[in-house]
Image (cartoon, helix red, strand yellow):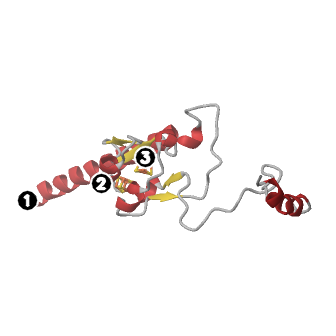
Amino acid sequence: MRAPILVPTVLRNLVRKPATNLFPKTEPVPVPENFRGQLKYNVDKCVGCRMCVTVCPAGVFVYLPDIRKVALWTGRCVYCAQCVDVCPTGALQMSDEFLLASYDNYDEKFIPLKEEKIEEIRKKLEEQKKAKEKAKAEKAKTEKKGSK
Ligand code: SF4
Ligand code: SF4
């Protein structure tokens, strides 16, 4: 009974351009402002306060006490941005990236802090510790000489 009412609409739409985005042949639909895409971690800004570890509902973070940084596996992330809101230094930011499909759960794009960088930080801290101890020992030696 309702078919005749629809006929003009159908005919009108038959001659109109499709309203479909042909991605991946074209660019995807642009993301809005403040879009919550893949999480980015700037390890140099991190002060190891562990606030992100506390608030994350998905268990993305693991605290690394020896270097006072956090390791992340964003494959678990639910994009809630609570860690971004709580981070006092801006070390965590949501990006516009959302094309994240992968065959590998442990693809390196899901692991922002790489093993090599962790090693580099460890070495740097070790060197700083040694330099501090050396300076301390030298200071003690000079003071001992001065008191004689
Ligand atoms: S965005 Fe949410 S789920 Fe993802 S790492 Fe941050 S707190 Fe965890
Ligand atoms: S909240 Fe920010 S500064 Fe604190 S441990 Fe996490 S990333 Fe580092």
Is 82 rendered above or below residue 109?
below
Left or right side of 37 for 122? left
Q: Secondary structure at mark 2?
A: loop
Per the image, the residue denoted by label 3 is 121
Q: Indicate left or right for 48 with 42 as reference.
A: left
Residue located beneath label 2 in the image: 49
Q: Nearer the viewer, mark 2 or mark 1?
A: 2
Left/right placement of residue 99 relative to residue 2 reads left
Of callouts 2 and 1, which one flags the residue occurring earlier in the amino acid sequence?
2
User: From the Cβ of disc 2, is ligand 2 less than 8 Å away?
Assistant: yes
- Residue pointed to by mark 1: 147
Q: If you read the primary sequence from the N terminus, does the residue marked by circle 1 or circle 3 appear first?
A: 3
CA separation in Å, label 2 and label 1: 42 Å
Q: Residue at x 60, y 58 (%)?
A: 96
Residue 80 or residue 145, whichever sits in front: 80
Residue 15 figure quarter = bottom right
Q: Is residue 100 above or below residue 13?
A: above
The label nearer to you, 1 versus 3, is: 3
Q: Amino acid at mark 1?
A: Ser
Answer yes or no: is residue 114 visible: no
